[in-house]
Amino acid sequence: MAVEIQRTLVLIKPDGVQRELVGDVVTRFERKGLKIVGMKLSHLSEDVLTEHYGHHKEKPFFPGLVAFMRETPVVAVVLEGLGAVDEVRKIVGSTNPLNADAGTIRADFSMSMAGNIVHASDTLENAAIEIARFFKPDEVFSYGKLTDKYHFGA
Ligand code: CMP
């Protein structure tokens, strides 16, 4: 089956913001060729986080996870590109940074499960749900590359 253009959601968590890793994280996605079609700082409410992490509600770490995610604003990003859901998860790496492959964001920048820098949607279906959770329709953009018109950097 041909790979399709997809959109997916990334949250750069409070540890990524506090450790001034926003630029490094976003650069990795841009360098891959993924297009930023939405991006904003957002201080997440308890209600939104309870919905977002609802599948972890019974886990012992849930209250700490919600509290941690509310420590500071996060950076929410919508990325677009070929097979974006899986490509982003490859770049992000395994949930536990100690198990993540070298070269991934989590392996390279973290040793903590709670402070694992980023969240990324796990399926195309969840990506659509999560994008709608964090972005209004008019906060996500469609645009083409202007390089041919303006010869950036050439
Ligand atoms: P994320 O991809 O945002 O999805 C759920 C988050 O819960 C996960 O990243 C981790 O940051 C966090 N998490 C998962 N398991 C644990 C755990 N055992 N202890 C603490 N935090 C966890």
Image (cartoon, rainbow, N blue to C red):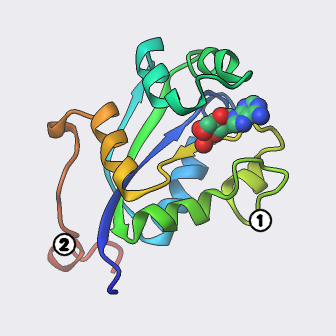
Total marks shown come to 2
Q: Quadrant location of residue 4?
A: bottom left
Of residues 3 and 71, the one nearer the viewer is 3
Q: Residue furthest bottom?
A: 1
Residue 119: x, y in percent?
56, 43
Of residues 48 and 11, the one nearer the viewer is 48
Name which residue type carries label 2.
Tyr
Residue 150 shows which numbered tag? 2
Q: Quadrant of ligand 1?
A: top right
Q: Residue at x 73, y 66 (%)?
A: 103
Q: Is residue 146 above or below residue 69?
A: below
Does 92 sit left or right of 109 as displayed? left
Of residues 54 and 10, the one nearer the viewer is 54
Q: CA distance from mark 1 to mark 2?
A: 39 Å
Q: Is residue 19 visible?
A: yes
Name which residue type carries label 1.
Asp
Q: Is mark 1 within 8 Å of ligand 1?
A: no
Q: For the residue labelled by badge 1, is the local secondary structure a helix, a strand or a loop?
A: loop
Q: For the residue labelled by badge 2, is the local secondary structure a helix, a strand or a loop?
A: helix
